[in-house]
Amino acid sequence: QKEVEQDPGPLSVPEGAIVSLNCTYSNSAFQYFMWYRQYSRKGPELLMYTYSSGNKEDGRFTAQVDKSSKYISLFIRDSQPSDSATYLCAMSAYAGNNRKLIWGLGTSLAVNP
Amino acid sequence: DAGVIQSPRHEVTEMGQEVTLRCKPISGHDYLFWYRQTMMRGLELLIYFNNNVPIDDSGMPEDRFSAKMPNASFSTLKIQPSEPRDSAVYFCASSFADLEQFFGPGTRLTVL
């Protein structure tokens, strides 16, 4: 079993839909949770960054962490064609100079006009 | 800031040849990461450095792969000899104060 599980999709939604992307993990030591967005033929870029449990909102994006269930989610409201990309979750226990991130496979999202 | 710079952007080579990928991290960043990305395996960490010193190379697949960071502004990833299964996109990333990693545009490697 991989440490981080993420459904690769692909996910296809109409413009304006609410999108829910999810990851599950097995390591209870993870404290830091990230969502990266990767456009085609580009490097990943950080979208959202949360510590421990709870919600964080940034514009149309909301990140949720449920440590009791070892489950994290990214919600996209009013989705736009420009949101079409691959979304990768990443996690870390972050101790000392350990900067290793554990990555999900990524979910490919297409938002259709 | 120019961001993380990688070269070449595309590399096509024949099996058995030596391949050298290059990376210039963002100035002032003290961590540098090398990743490989494929459809089947996703983003895999190969090795990372802190202040030019390798911290974790457990992801380097085998002895054919080697990485160096001779100074704070330059790193190389070398594959010798290359094999078709090494075909992938190789990313370099750098970071400074926290966990956020800044990725370069990647090098698309094809080994025939």
Image (cartoon, rainbow, N blue to C red):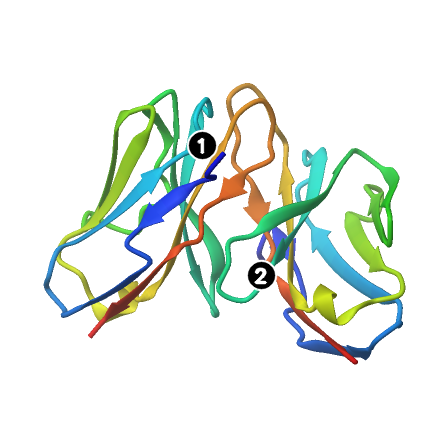
User: How dense is the environment of label 1, judged by Cα within 10 Å: few (below 14), some, or many (20 and up)?
Assistant: many
What amino acid is at disc 2?
Leu
Give the position of the C terminus of chain B as an image quadrant: bottom left
Q: A26 and A72: which one is in front?
A: A72
Residue ID at (66%, 42%): A27
Residue A73 lies in quadrant = bottom right
User: Is B54 located above or below residue A86 in the figure?
Assistant: above
**Location of mark 1 (residue):** B26
- Secondary structure beneath dot 2 equals loop
The chain letter under disc 1 is: B
The chain letter under disc 2 is: A
* Left or right of residue B112, residue B89 in this image: right
Residue ID at (58%, 22%): B97
**Location of mark 2 (residue):** A105
User: How dense is the environment of label 2, judged by Cα within 10 Å: few (below 14), some, or many (20 and up)?
Assistant: many
Is circle 1 on the same chain as circle 2? no
What amino acid is at disc 1?
Ile
Residue ID at (63%, 53%): A4
